[in-house]
Amino acid sequence: MTYRVVVAASGRGSNLLALGDALARRPEEAAIVAVLSDRDAPALELARQRGWPAIRLLTPAEPLEMTSALRACRADLLVLAGYLRLIPSEVVQEWQGRIINIHPSLLPRHGGVGMYGRRVHAAVLAAGDTTSGATVHLVDEVFDRGEILAQGTVPVRAEDSPESLAARVLEVEHRLLPKAVLVAAEHRRPVAFTLD
Ligand code: GRF
């Protein structure tokens, strides 16, 4: 049975698109059944263009809208792809082990409150790290803390800016997230894996 995936995104939605493209090639394995956002994000417009139900949450700090949407969609998995809000603890509890997030660093380095977008890559450069990458992990009540399922690495180059590093990491994200979802579909729950 097709694994039913809901994606939450607050931004431009490139991971959403990469996931949608990958799943479109494997429709009997997994499919995006809705896209949620806490704001009028470009990702919601992309969802409408692709024909995925697009849901703008009006009270994202409250659990009700999110749990209603997940139940109504009969979701198997919630994927956070650039979703910038903490998931209410009621949702985390009900969907324990069935929510994953992608983060643009090698967690536990450079995660936590306020660590998103350009700030993550600036922190990697400021720390002098020679390797960075992306992490897919289970979601719990604390930002970027849940069990790590997989990571993909990239080199940090001496001439990197936050933008050039972000672009290199994003390519890895676009391979890592689809694989995380396809592996989860195969096992009917998110599990650890390695990126080739
Ligand atoms: C990605 O870097 C993701 O890792 C992070 O937010 C960014 C979202 O980018 N959580 P996009 O909206 O998928 O293009």
Image (cartoon, rainbow, N blue to C red):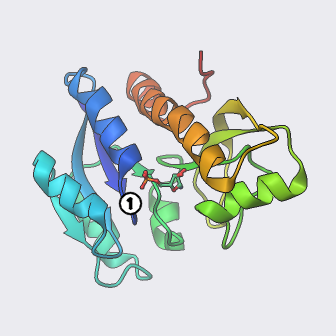
> Residue 182: where, in percent of width, then height?
40, 26
Classify 133 as above or below 58: above
Q: Residue at x 36, y 74 (%)?
A: 38
Which amino acid lies under the numbered mark 1 shown in the image of this protein? Ala
**SS of the residue at dot 1?**
loop
Q: Residue at x 68, y 45 (%)?
A: 147
* Dot 1 crowding, Cα within 10 Å, few <14, some 14–19, many 20+: many
Is residue 138 shown left or right of residue 179? Answer: right
Q: Which residue is mark 1?
A: 9
Q: Residue at x 38, y 60 (%)?
A: 9
Residue nearest the observer in this picture, 11 or 77: 11
> Residue 196: where, in percent of width, then height?
59, 15
Residue nearest the observer in this picture, 102 or 161: 161
> Residue 117: where, in percent of width, then height?
58, 61
Is residue 141 visible to the viewer in this orientation of the structure?
yes
Classify 54 as above or below 101: below
Does mark 1's beta carbon lie closer than 8 Å to ligand 1? yes
Q: Quadrant of the N terminus?
A: top left
Is residue 145 visible to the viewer in this orientation of the structure?
no
